[in-house]
């Protein structure tokens, strides 16, 4: 009978965390891979009159209509005029589309200790890590923008 | 007919609704057809003015203003959609009239929960329309807050009106423009218009 060996090596592998690195307005960011619902070509968004911070549009993918979270506006960067990609974020209250630069997102595996928290970070930010020699902020897509939403309900 | 049968029929009627789809600020917007009293070509009417049609005076509002969208340059496709309820009337200036569409109300999806602000009272939902999405505004919000007379702050100095042949013969003041009726059949391409049983409630559909 074939059996997967269970040794120290596999225990170490189980604790590693997978991150997806992507670019918004020229700024490199990362998010946990299990909170990414996919990456698709960007479709034109439909503007929705809205008072919700950074949620002012929806985008259609097939029969699915997703709200758009304007991460570029939140970061204060310009998303540029070229092609874009749609990063599907698995937020707690449902899927959400995030417009990212056309650079193909990359997958990275690292030890959780490689993500360190910073003194001043927002509630939807996990910390920062080093990818390719560059310090990259790691966001929780499950919590992306949720604090602003909850603050409005208080 | 049995009572049970009548109940079934009523359920089918409620499930379907008719909308007039217009374009405003590049966005398809579906106006419930039971609000629509007419569609006119606003040759000289601008937001802040009024349109007189069948004896009623409609204050003109740009639909893009209601949504806070940027204005699109005037085109010959621009129309004023005359809307009204029992106690309020309003002319909505739109960039283009697309046409009538019948829709199963179950196809209207509410706004995703991510939208958590006042927009939940402005927008009933969205539905898949052609290659994109159309917006269904809340009827009460759409015309409910508008007063019959435009607020002074909303008055825009109108450009020098260019009287149409239909207007030259009739006197009118500088702010009230007698509407030129539009042949709706030229405007509608989403659905062919068929006579419906409740056509008396929608006189604008009688073409």
Image (cartoon, helix red, strand yellow):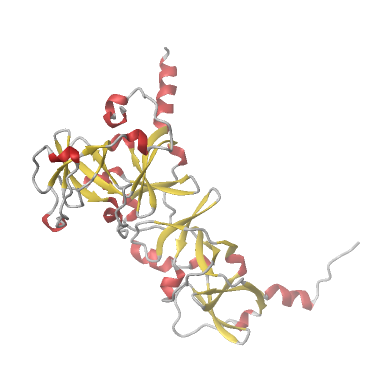
The one nearer the camera, B108 or B10, is B108
Q: Residue at x 47, y 72 (%)?
A: A79
The quadrant of the rendering that contains the C terminus of chain A is bottom left
Q: Residue furthest top?
A: B1
Residue A113 occupies quadrant: bottom right
Q: Residue at x 32, y 24 (%)?
A: B198
Residue B152: x percent and y percent?
A: 11, 55
- The answer to whether residue A122 is above or below residue B65 is below
The one nearer the camera, B47 or A2, is B47
Residue A152: x percent and y percent?
A: 34, 64
Q: Residue at x 45, y 64 (%)?
A: A69
Q: Residue at x 47, y 70 (%)?
A: A81
Residue B105: x percent and y percent?
A: 43, 37
Q: Is residue B112 rendered to the left or right of residue A34?
A: left
Counting every numbered tag in the picture gives 0
Q: Is residue B6 visible?
A: yes
Q: Is residue B88 visible?
A: no
- The answer to whether residue B165 is above or below residue A119 is above
Q: Residue furthest bottom?
A: A133
Q: Is residue B88 rendered to the left or right of residue A104?
A: left
Residue A153 occupies quadrant: bottom left
Q: Is residue B65 rendered to the left or right of residue A43?
A: left
Residue A15 occupies quadrant: bottom right
Residue B14: x percent and y percent?
A: 39, 30
The quadrant of the rendering that contains the N terminus of chain A is bottom right
The one nearer the camera, A9 or B196, is B196
């Amino acid at each position: 009978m074939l059996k997967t060996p269970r040794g120290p090596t596999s225990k170490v592998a189980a604790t590693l965390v997978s991150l997806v690195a992507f670019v918004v307005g020229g700024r490199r960011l990362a998010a946990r891979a299990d909170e990414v619902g996919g990456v698709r070509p960007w479709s034109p968004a439909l503007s929705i009159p809205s008072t919700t911070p950074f949620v002012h549009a929806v985008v259609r993918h097939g029969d699915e209509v997703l709200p758009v979270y304007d991460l570029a506006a939140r970061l204060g960067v310009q998303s540029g005029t070229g092609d874009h990609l749609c990063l599907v974020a698995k937020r707690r209250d449902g899927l959400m589309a995030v417009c990212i630069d056309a650079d193909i997102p990359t997958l990275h595996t690292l030890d959780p200790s490689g993500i360190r928290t910073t003194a001043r970070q927002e509630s939807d930010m996990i910390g920062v890590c080093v990818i390719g020699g560059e310090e990259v902020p790691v966001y929780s897509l499950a919590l992306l923008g949720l604090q602003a939403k909850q603050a409005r309900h208080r | 007919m049995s009572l049970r049968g009548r109940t079934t029929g009523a359920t089918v009627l409620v499930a379907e609704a008719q909308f007039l789809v217009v374009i405003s600020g590049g966005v398809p917007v579906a106006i419930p057809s039971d609000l629509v009293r007419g569609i006119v070509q606003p040759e000289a009417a601008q937001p802040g003015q009024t349109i007189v049609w069948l004896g009623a005076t409609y204050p003109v509002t740009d639909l893009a203003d209601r949504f806070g969208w940027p204005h699109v340059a005037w085109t010959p496709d621009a129309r004023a959609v005359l809307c009204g309820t029992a106690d309020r009337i309003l002319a909505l200036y739109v960039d283009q009239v697309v046409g009538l569409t019948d829709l199963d109300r179950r196809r209207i999806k509410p706004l995703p929960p991510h939208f958590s602000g006042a927009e939940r009272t402005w927008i009933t939902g969205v539905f898949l329309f052609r290659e994109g999405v159309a917006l269904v505004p809340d009827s009460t919000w759409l015309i409910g807050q508008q007063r019959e007379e435009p607020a002074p702050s909303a008055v825009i100095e109108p450009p020098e009106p260019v009287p149409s042949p239909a207007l030259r013969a009739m006197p009118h003041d500088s702010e009230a423009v007698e509407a030129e009726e539009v042949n709706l059949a030229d405007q509608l391409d989403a659905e062919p218009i068929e006579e419906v049983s409740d056509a008396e409630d929608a006189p604008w559909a009688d073409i």
